[in-house]
Image (cartoon, rainbow, N blue to C red):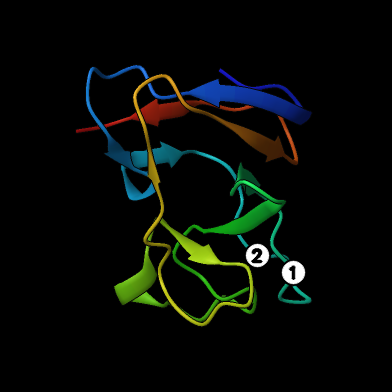
Amino acid sequence: NVTTGFNIIANPFPSEVSIQNIKCDLDGLDDNGEFQTTMRLWNGSGYTYYGWLDGEDGTNNEVPEWNNSWLLIDMSDLSPAKLKVGEAIWFIAPTAGTVTFTK
């Protein structure tokens, strides 16, 4: 479970995992098209930001190919990021909710 605001979560598996395998029950985009749920992964010199898309583009239009996925923050594509064994990522939540790792 996560709480409102900044949370840190880590890869619980004994192998690398795609961030596409991190799912949550939180909001994606708001009515202005801004991500509500985001993650920040350290890339060695700064953070790379990712946004959660829960199936709608913020104006209730379905985007099935990106349903329940992490996108690059500029919304140009799905995130290819992976978490190494034990690697952590900042998870920023608009409300309390559930985060699940799948594999």
Label 1 crowd bin: few (<14), some (14–19), many (20+), radius 10 Å:
few
Which residue appears farthest toward the front when viewing the image?
45
- Residue contact at pointers 1 and 2, CB within 8 angstroms: yes
The amino acid pointed to by label 2 is Leu
Q: Nearer the viewer, residue 90 or 101?
A: 90
Q: Nearer the viewer, residue 61 or 98?
A: 98
**Residue at left 73%, top 34%?**
95
Q: Which mark is residue 82?
A: none
The amino acid pointed to by label 1 is Glu
**Residue at left 77%, top 30%?**
6
- Mark 2 element type: loop
Where on the picture, by quarter, is residue 15? top left
Q: Position of residue 84 (x, y in %)?
A: 36, 32
Instruction: Decide: is 52 above or below 84.
Output: below
**Residue at left 39%, top 28%?**
100
Describe residue 24's horizontal placement relative to residue 91 as left or right.
Answer: left
**Residue at left 42%, top 19%?**
86
Q: Which residue is mark 2?
A: 29
Q: Position of residue 36 (x, y in %)?
A: 71, 54
Instruction: Decide: is 61 above or below 71.
Output: below
Q: Position of residue 9 (x, y in %)?
A: 55, 23
Where on the picture, by quarter, is residue 68? bottom left
Q: Position of residue 78 (x, y in %)?
A: 40, 69
Quadrant housing the C terminus: top left
- Mark 1 element type: loop
Q: Which mark is residue 34?
A: 1
